[in-house]
Amino acid sequence: MSLKDQEFLYSVFRKEIKDRKIPLSLGKTCPVKCTFCYEMDHTYRKTFETPLTTQEHWDFIFKEIRSFPTRDSESWILGGNEYMEWTDLALHPKAMDWIEEFLEKTDKKITMFSVGYFDPERINRLAEKYPGRINFELSVITLGSYREQLMPKGPSVKQVLAVLDGPAVTSANFYSFGSGSMSEDAKKISDINKDCLLWMGCLTPLKYIDADTTKVMRQGKRFLPGEARKIYDMNLPNVQMIHTESDITAFLNRNKIIKTFDACELEKKDWIVMAGNVHRILTLFRRGRARFLYVPNDTLGGDSNCTTLLTFDDVAKRITNQRVIHLP
Ligand code: SF4
């Protein structure tokens, strides 16, 4: 690598580190190839190609990280880069060694995202040795019959359950894909680990998700209320969170949305831009009080209709003769 390329690479690392990311790279797109992966298209943000992180890169990264003061409220993220593609970094052959070094030589916290490729014994031993320093968000996704279809190269159920069996995992996320999917997973996970938070919901089909996966995701949405009810009735000891669909989230926040709208004191002729979820609320509760410009989430496409995920491109495509618009 030329000095110029190295300088550029280090400047990308620095940007990530400034945002409290630990910028490891597999040097390729994610080999897990989940069919639901939202990183299949990252045209919505600028990313740079980076090679497999070497020991020399790590020495640079770690030195930079150590130069930042430790703040109690901060946790360094492994597996959620901004300027580099997301991959499952547990697959980096040195990931565990570097995590251990991070924990040993700093007093900082770490948040890790993975589908579960960590060595179960080692990760659980580290969590025991450094209590309260590891926040491990395990993407279980599903343990049932759809796992093979959605994660053909994902870790085995046995591996995932072994990772869950110990103090390392702080939250496990998994989703509804049909009858007996999310609810059975909740039971299985809770039987093994009563302390981890159960983070549940549905996955939303975006435009680049294949037809079979889209079908399963939509089916999951239909079964979500029933699955949620079954879990409620199980009275599991784990803390539970249901990640609601954007329509429901908007409805639950309707008073806040209406209050914000009212506070803007718009005129009837003013244009205000929004996607489907907020559009429904305002046309229902504030009909005729401004001109509501419904903007589809074209960048993400699929079933996405969340106002907070609108891009400027989406808005630009929708504008015709409006001279002034309001973006909430
Ligand atoms: S492990 Fe994560 S980044 Fe990799 S393909 Fe699956 S969802 Fe995408």
Image (spheres, rainbow, N blue to C red):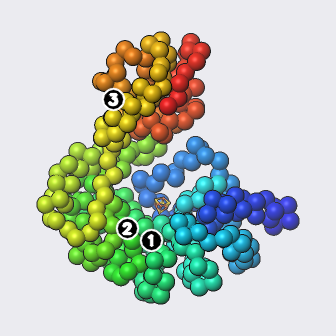
Q: Residue at x 59, y 59 (%)?
A: 81
Q: Residue at x 32, y 47 (%)?
A: 244
Task: State the residue in front, 58 or 21.
Answer: 21
The three-letter amino acid code for the residue at tag 3 is Ile
Q: For mark 2, what is the residue?
A: 171
119 is higher (above) or lower (below) than 301: below
Element marked by disc 1: strand
Q: Please provide percent x and percent y for residue 31.
A: 52, 64
Marks 1 and 2: in contact by CB < 8 Å? yes
Element marked by disc 3: helix
Q: Indicate yes or no: mark 2 CB to ligand 1 under 8 Å.
A: no
Q: Please provide percent x and percent y for residue 36.
A: 41, 53
Residue 89 occupies quadrant: bottom right
Q: Earlier in the sequence, mark 2 or mark 1?
A: 1
Q: Earlier in the sequence, mark 2 or mark 3?
A: 2
Relative to 250, is 208 on the left or the right?
right
Q: Residues within 10 Å of mark 2 (few under 14, many from 20)?
A: many
205 is higher (above) or lower (below) than 153: above
Q: Residues within 10 Å of mark 3 (few under 14, many from 20)?
A: some
The three-letter amino acid code for the residue at tag 2 is Ser
Can residue 115 be seen in this snapshot? no
Q: For mark 3, what is the residue?
A: 281
Q: Residue at x 76, y 64 (%)?
A: 10
Q: CA distance from mark 3 to mark 1?
A: 36 Å
Q: Please provide percent x and percent y for residue 67.
A: 72, 72
Q: Indicate yes or no: mark 1 CB to ligand 1 under 8 Å.
A: no
Can residue 13 be seen in this snapshot? yes
Q: Please provide percent x and percent y for residue 308.
A: 47, 39
